[in-house]
Image (spheres, coloured by chain):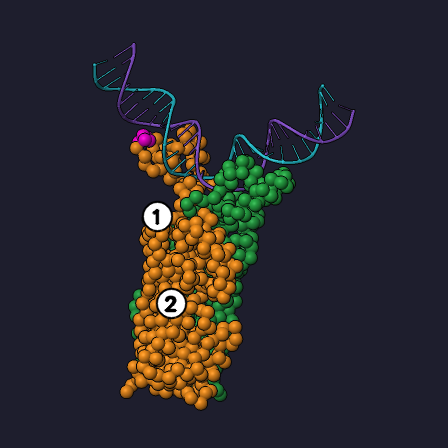
Chain colours: A green, B orange, C purple, D cyan
Amino acid sequence: MSGKITLKKIAQHLGVAVSTVSKALKNSPEISMETRQRILNYVEKVNYHPNALAISLQRQRTMTIGIIVPELVHHFFSRVISGAENHASRCGYKLLISLSNDEWDKERQVTEMLANGYVDGILISVAKQTFEKGNFDHFSNLIQHKFPLVFFDRAPSDLPVDKIIINDVEGGYRATKHLIDKGAKRIAILTTPPHISVGADRERGYLKALNEYSLEVNAHLIVHVDERQPVREQIAILFEQNIAPDAIFAVNEKYAALALKLALQNNLKVPDDLMIIGFTDGFISKSTTPSLSTMAQHGFEMGEKAMEILLEKIEDKSLFDTQKIVFIPTNLVERESTKLKS
Amino acid sequence: MSGKITLKKIAQHLGVAVSTVSKALKNSPEISMETRQRILNYVEKVNYHPNALAISLQRQRTMTIGIIVPELVHHFFSRVISGAENHASRCGYKLLISLSNDEWDKERQVTEMLANGYVDGILISVAKQTFEKGNFDHFSNLIQHKFPLVFFDRAPSDLPVDKIIINDVEGGYRATKHLIDKGAKRIAILTTPPHISVGADRERGYLKALNEYSLEVNAHLIVHVDERQPVREQIAILFEQNIAPDAIFAVNEKYAALALKLALQNNLKVPDDLMIIGFTDGFISKSTTPSLSTMAQHGFEMGEKAMEILLEKIEDKSLFDTQKIVFIPTNLVERESTKLKS
DNA sequence: ACTGACAACGAAAACGTTTTCGTGAAACAA
DNA sequence: TTGTTTCACGAAAACGTTTTCGTTGTCAGT
């Protein structure tokens, strides 16, 4: 930082005007070959790089996109970010990643901060606490000011916004149907409390499938896992009932892996005594023995698509009043935990 | 973005000078109560937020730290970032996360970009390709210009820089010693090619332990996994030899999980026939059955510590010429894969 | 009535760029 | 000689702040 080299210093040293240096650097025909070379040589020598801040301020564009995720240590979000970064850098944009820690206040702060000059647009997946609180003012505010904003995965349902989401109902349906096709009759579900939309939607798909195949819905087989309590115990209940499930659909990888572990500890054979299918295709599902069948979510594609829509909005002002909703399909990855020998 | 509200607009609307508005907003005593209230009311009404870019430019500080990681979809790096973000936000700094994708050129680009005004300092873990290439010019350049720079986990060895690293030699030593203590005699290691320093160091620790306990070093039991080839086959070789190992030390979680899976497929009992220990305490190690013993790396603490040292450097210019090297200790997490019943 | 102090505000520079609009000199035509 | 181009460059505004240094006007003290 000490003695940072600027256009002004270059100009002074060479005895020319700042504007001359600036033009020479962009090969403007206004500057004579001779002067241009002199400037270029010196610039090269002192290893000059323009100050991005100043350029952004003057251009009123930062060529940076902000992405806000609830947490980083999470396979799915990491994938989305990678996808977004991929598309952004291909289009000459940089990515500024921020965390909300699933907290409303932090999310509000970060959102405002980014919108105040840091970035040209924002990609966001809403914090859990924001859903609980039901306060989306920080978003309405941006929308009102026509600030480019695109939601992914977790989006407010009653705001007119662009969103890229997983087709969770369908995913839940297909996961359940897969178990039914394999002959399961008493299918349990490990899901989230109802206010988490992704869990609720997958549960809706589950119910739809049961219904369609005239299987009885048993309240004892529906476990709403409360993360504030020990998760293990809540899942363990499934194995202590007199009517044991013959299959489990877990709405995420963590619950699926835990269910598998408990099943093995209870000397159940997976998949023969109990089939298990999860959601999200991460490292864990591949690593267990038996490996876990799952509904893959394609986070990378989601990130790419979200970025694509956001950049379109930024570069084409006429899209301001149109809202796109894109569903990213899930697909079944069949592994050992549902693959019966018979 | 349309009709963005600025100090100038506020001043015009209220018939005062820009400086007056600015001062009123910072509660300067120069401004009379009356005017201040008038300004504050209006500012509140139009929901004004200062432009961060302009402030950064004028202050010559962005209150933002850049962090560059090789990849995001990686438990350890995610943890480091979370730790860094934690400390940064506590100190009023924001975090700008960027990816190098383990590529030299991308790393160079991103580093220069960030250094040119975007951030006040950089935290970085070096790309694999940069090590292969051996070109660290983009770093020397920054160091020469006294730009605050701190390395974590993967650092250039012959540059005078601040770095926070895992004590990999010791970690490798302790992992191996743990296996020896449990009675292992033929300990295999799944490690990286020699140019990846973390792998090489852990291997050094492994050799040190073998040596110390007078165990024979067997070249067939040392597997340098080349990620450009199928990993599974390379590990499988271990199970096809006539002198089978009775324990495996894997330098990361992925190799450990894969080794476990292959062992189970070969009808080996873990830990009785074969013990396995990994490195990095992620989700996978906990999820397998049997669960994997591992050397935990404490990425979160590493991120916090790295950020702490960087911020110190930024805020106390007198630290320019001192270089700190901090070792983050690993610790043994004993799980089922090395827990013998006997 | 004159000085001095103080309160309340404005003007302008600065941060590092880009870009528009001159302007002086040389070159050329008449 | 004068007028018109063209060339090569400089001056200055602008982006949105902060901050320093005036500049008023009022009022107390003498």
Residue A87 in percent (x, y) is at: 54, 58
How many marks on residues? 2
Does residue A118 show up? no
Residue at the limit of the structure toward the bottom, as seen here: B242
The residue carrying pointer 2 sits among few (fewer than 14), some (14 to 19) or many (20 or more) residues within 10 Å by Cα, namely: many
Please state if A24 lies on the left or on the right of A109 as rendered. Answer: right
The residue carrying pointer 1 sits among few (fewer than 14), some (14 to 19) or many (20 or more) residues within 10 Å by Cα, namely: few
Query: Considering depth in this image, is A289 or A243 the residue closer to the camera?
Result: A289
Q: Chain of mark 1?
A: B
Residue B221 in percent (x, y) is at: 42, 82
Q: CA distance from mark 1 to mark 2?
A: 50 Å
Q: Secondary structure at mark 2?
A: loop
Residue displayed at 35% across by 56% down: B323
Residue B81 in percent (x, y) is at: 39, 60
Q: Chain of mark 2?
A: A
Residue C19 in percent (x, y) is at: 57, 38
Does residue B147 show up? yes
Q: Amino acid at mark 2?
A: Thr
User: Is the residue at mark 1 from the same chain as the one at mark 2?
Assistant: no
Residue displayed at 50% across by 46% down: A46
Magenta: main secondary structure equals loop
Mark number displayed over residue B317:
1
Magenta segment: B30-34
Q: Secondary structure at mark 1?
A: helix
Query: Considering depth in this image, is B46 or A92 the residue closer to the camera?
Result: A92
Does the magenta-highlighted stretch encompass residue B147? no
Residue marked by disc 2: A192
- Would you identify the image quadrant in which residue B20 lies? top left
